[in-house]
């Protein structure tokens, strides 16, 4: 949807287009919407991708407050990474909950499907797990 942003040289009708800045705005669209279910072990950690495009390019946010800390981190590209964790670091509100990805720009906002995350603790020694 083109939008007239500014007309700074419109003295004559014929010169109107000479000084007009045209923006082509588009609301966000998913390129890769996260899956419905993501499972990972404490040994591997997990990753959820959520990408999209729009004009201007959309920001990526996650519905669960994912303050960047030792358990989960939002990467600069918007992906959500779950770090490997020990049994005492398991948090129900991080490792067993529902997330949604939000793409947002000047034109609009879209939400992904619910992503059911399950991080499981696998107790194994070096001889049985690799």
Image (cartoon, rainbow, N blue to C red):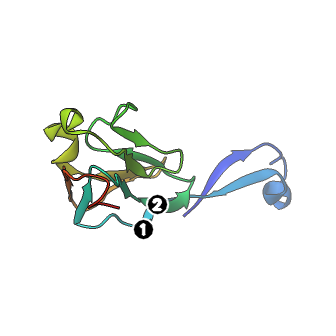
- Extreme-front residue of the structure: 127
Reply above or below: 104 against 33: above
Q: Residue at x 38, y 56 (%)?
A: 47
| For residue 61, side relative to residue 90 (left or right) | right
* Image x and y of residue 82, in percent: 35, 47
* Image x and y of residue 98, in percent: 18, 51
Quadrant location of the N terminus in the rendered image? bottom right
Q: Mark 1 or 2 closer to N-term?
A: 1
Numbered disc total: 2
Reply above or below: 24 against 45: below
Q: Residue at x 44, y 65 (%)?
A: 29
Residue at disc 2, secondary structure: strand
| For residue 19, side relative to residue 121 (left or right) | right
Residue assigned mark 1: 32
Badge number at residue 51: 2
Q: Nearer the viewer, residue 41 or 116?
A: 41
Q: Residue at x 22, y 53 (%)?
A: 124
| For residue 100, side relative to residue 75 (left or right) | left
Report crowding for label 2: few under 14, some 14 to 19, many 20 or more residues within 10 A (C-alpha): many
* Image x and y of residue 23, in percent: 65, 56
Residue at disc 1, secondary structure: strand
Badge number at residue 60: none
Pointer 1 and pointer 2: residues touching (CB < 8 Å)?
A: yes
């Amino acid at each position: 949807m083109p939008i007239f942003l500014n007309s700074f040289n419109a003295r004559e009708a014929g010169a109107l287009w000479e000084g007009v800045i045209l923006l082509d705005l588009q609301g966000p669209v998913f390129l890769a919407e996260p899956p419905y279910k993501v499972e990972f072990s404490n040994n591997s950690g997990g990753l959820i991708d959520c990408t999209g495009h729009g004009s201007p390019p959309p920001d990526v946010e996650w519905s669960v407050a994912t303050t960047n800390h030792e358990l989960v981190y939002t990467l600069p590209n918007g992906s959500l990474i779950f770090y490997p964790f020990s049994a005492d670091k398991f948090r129900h509100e991080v490792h067993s909950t529902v997330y949604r990805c939000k793409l947002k720009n000047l034109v609009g906002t879209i939400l992904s499907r619910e992503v059911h995350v399950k991080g499981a603790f696998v107790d194994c020694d070096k001889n049985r797990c690799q």
